[in-house]
Image (spheres, rainbow, N blue to C red):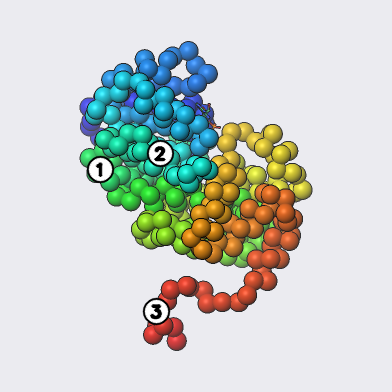
Amino acid sequence: MSQSVKSVVILGAGAWGTALAKLAAINGNQVHLWSRQGSQSLVSVLENAHIVLSAISMQGVRDVASVVQSSPVSPETIFVTATKGLEPKTTYTPSQIWQEIFPNHPVVVLSGPNLSQEIVRELPAATVVASKNINAAQSVQLVFSSSRFRVYTNPDPVGVELGGTLKNVIAIAAGVCDGLNLGTNAKAALVTRGLTEIVRIGKNLGAKTETFYGLSGLGDLLATCNSPLSRNYQLGYQLAHGKTLKEILASLPGTAEGVNTCRVLMEIAQQRSIAIPISEQVYQLLEGEVTPQQALDQLMLRDIKPEFDDFPKEQMW
Ligand SMILES: NC(=O)C1=CN([C@@H]2O[C@H](COP(=O)(O)OP(=O)(O)OC[C@H]3O[C@@H](n4cnc5c(N)ncnc54)[C@H](O)[C@@H]3O)[C@@H](O)[C@H]2O)C=CC1
Ligand SMILES: O=C(CO)COP(=O)(O)O
């Protein structure tokens, strides 16, 4: 794979930022990994950057993007966001924040089934880079593609971003399901109906349905709902074992975005009258309003209904 060497700045030296820095460096790019705890100033690393990738957790995205805005950045710089979350105040996705702050720059979303601990061990993985600007997506594809990391382009950034973000809520539910030992049938039903909720929200917010059946949707949902490496899954698993949210968050390594995402998601669903029963039970569980067993009972005892909302009537029977 040939490409010119790019200057890549990674913002956030947490688990994901560090793994992505390693992937970009393998291809010979010039990589600067910036952390708020480090000694390098943001201004000094941003100078001449071709690509600025944010792997900051959701709560820091707007602050960091605002600091970047007040620094000199080349008009050609491509911004890439790898954060999986929603902003509470605006309900924006991270790419919407970056695009709002940098309206004249291309913004690319990078998302997929990418548990960072497997990627730093150089196990094979695939991801998606999505943008309205195909040239920008292809530049980012070249920077990160290697024999261990296969990168696909996609023209639906909102869909790719929402797949990666909303699956964290379902991953909490999957952790609860395994923690309660509910079995393989229950898990399959949960993940499949969880995907239905993600598609409902995504379509309403302008994403393409097919995107949710790709790597950044179903792919990431499967990875996160089936791996104890996922912090969101772990959180659900420990809730099922009787720990409180506060206790779990105090010992969890890194960020479990699903907690904040679930609150914002409930707001979006209520505003737009979208039914998301699994996510609603996760919300009530996180708020301490139901126990894991009560959440399960509430889901199983809902009114019976057709499987699909929008089957054309003539195709029904
Ligand atoms: N770890 C993983 O396997 C993956 C994580 N992600 C997403 O990437 C994002 C980061 O995840 P991790 O690296 O795992 O989390 P982490 O908790 O290990 O690191 C978060 C990073 O954000 C920085 N940060 C937080 N608030 C900040 C602020 N106000 N100013 C400056 N920096 C700030 C922290 O200093 C840290 O470097 C999350 O949205 C996560 O969902 C996406 C794919 C894989
Ligand atoms: O998004 C991820 C894998 O694709 C990481 O999941 P967690 O944030 O739950 O660890």
Q: Earlier in the sequence, mark 3 or mark 1?
A: 1
The answer to whether one can see residue 153 in this image is: no
Across and down, in percent, residue 314 comes to 39, 85
Q: Earlier in the sequence, mark 3 or mark 2?
A: 2
Out of 261 and 148, give the one closest to the viewer. 261
Viewer-nearest of discs 1 and 2 = 2
Farthest residue to the right: give it: 242
Which residue corresponds to mark 2?
97
Disc 2 C-beta below 8 A from ligand 1: no
Q: Tell me the quarter of the image containing the C terminus.
A: bottom left
- Kind of residue sitting beneath label 1: Asn
- Kind of residue sitting beneath label 3: Pro
Crowd tier of the residue under label 3, counting other residues whose Cα lies within 10 Å: few below 14, some 14–19, many 20 or above: few
Out of 306 and 90, give the one closest to the viewer. 90
Say what secondary structure mark 3 lies in.
loop
Q: Tell me the quarter of the image containing the N terminus.
A: top left
Disc 3 C-beta below 8 A from ligand 2: no
Out of 19 and 160, give the one closest to the viewer. 160
Say what secondary structure mark 2 lies in.
helix
Q: Whole-Å distance between the Cαs marked 1 and 2? A: 17 Å
The answer to whether one can see residue 233 in this image is: yes
Which residue is at 61% across, 65% downward? Answer: 185
Which circle marks residue 133 in the picture? 1
Q: Earlier in the sequence, mark 1 or mark 2?
A: 2
Which residue corresponds to mark 3?
312
- Where is 77 relative to 241, above or below? above
Q: Whole-Å distance between the Cαs marked 3 and 1? A: 35 Å
Q: Whole-Å distance between the Cαs marked 3 and 2? A: 37 Å
